[in-house]
Amino acid sequence: MCRASGGDETAVMEILNFYDAYISKLCLRPFYHENGKVSMRVDEEWKGDIHTAMLKAILKSEVYIGNSVHNMQSTVSFKSKKKVRKPESEWFRIENTHEPIIDKEVFYRVQEQIKSRRRQTKEKATPIFAGLVKCADCGWSMRFATNKANKTPYSYYSCSFYGQFGKGYCSMHYIRYDVLYQAVLERLQYWAKAVQQDEEKVLHKIQKVGNAERIREKKKKANALKKAENRQNEIDRLFAKMYEDRACEKITERNFIMLSGKYQKEQIELEQQITNLREELSKMEQDMIGAEKWIELIKEYSVPKELTAPLLNAMIEKILIHEATTNEDNERIQEIEIYYRFIGKVD
């Protein structure tokens, strides 16, 4: 599944071959010969469209990790049978309803890759950092662009929030592509060489520093979850009391309807928030033991001589770009924070 989302043709073909007989049957169409005879043939164009839609659905379906998701769509009205997709905030998710066939870690990694899918530029180039580079201040993705006005054209990244709304919201956070490329390459090369020299030492450092940061983040999310669950219980009690007050005519019907709508909306929001926090905490539990996995990835790629999209996706979670400053010697200084998969930020 993860290989298929990354563009591995063999993995994609394995999925398509599994369903091929069923899809071919669906795509049978009558073919009329010049002599008047009719035969059934597979409509290859239609089959290709089904392949595309099916792959997208499979890669995004939580069924494969043991979850059941309901209330994803509804009809336009009781008079129409046309189906419309509901916003994710209205879905009902029930976890672990059956045995998963895909590891959750793999599934969530695939979702991140789908969200950060790479689009070609007008020059047909695909930026290898797409989806990974974020503004350190506002958190928005960095926009890739090329300066063609210069005698020697060069590419760069800038904050997309700043680009969309201007000053007062964020700053440019400008960084040249070649500067970013070299900085990231040097860090990956450093870790690869360090693992080759003393794997145990690197492992100990990652576990000590990386896990400490993740423990802080985990505690923060656990507190948020507890707060949301307490509020959910409080709303349940308020609902019960409100029904009693209405039955005893202590509140008017108008106020009852108004409060019901308010609390129901908050209930839906809390259910989604609680579900998301539980999933994030579950994912963090898996990542807490990820130092060994990251070491294995480093060893797999050895000492890289160049950066590629598969390498960056495998090793890095996100890259935060800070606004540049100048020192006393008028030299440009810019902080680049790299958060690695499984282990977070480790300097």
Image (cartoon, rainbow, N blue to C red):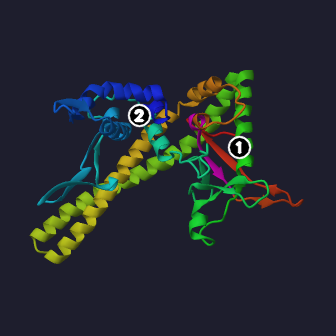
Dot 2 alpha-carbon crowd within 10 angstroms: few under 14, some 14 to 19, many 20 or more: some
Q: Quadrant of the N terminus?
A: top left
Q: Which mark is residue 181?
A: 1
Q: Is residue 18 left or right of residue 169?
A: left
Q: Is residue 132 visible?
A: yes
1 vs 2, front mark: 1
User: In the image, residue 37 lies at what x, y percent?
Assistant: 16, 30
Element under label 1?
helix
Q: CA distance from mark 1 to mark 2?
A: 31 Å
Task: Tell me, yes or no, whether the highlighted magenta stretch contains residue 320.
Answer: yes
Helix, strand or loop for disc 2: helix
Residue 204 is covered by the magenta coloring:
no
Using residue 47 as the reference point, say whether residue 213 is left or right of it. right
Figure quadrant of the C terminus: top right
Q: Nearer the viewer, residue 92 or 232?
A: 92
Q: Position of residue 230 (x, y in %)?
A: 34, 54
The amino acid on which the numbered mark 1 sits, given as a three-letter code, is: Tyr
Tell me the residue that label 2 is attached to: 104
Which amino acid, by three-letter code, is at mark 2? Lys
Left or right of 169 on screen, residue 93: left
Please tell me which residue is depicted at 42% across the width and 35% down the height of the picture.
107
Residue nearest the viewer, comparing 137 with 73 = 73
Which label was assigned to residue 284? none
Magenta highlight range: 313-322
Q: Quadrant of residue 261?
A: bottom left
**Residue toward you, 75 or 135:** 75
Q: Dot 1: within a 10 Å radius of its alpha carbon, few (fewer than 14), some, or many (20 or more) residues?
A: some
Above or below 95: residue 21:
above
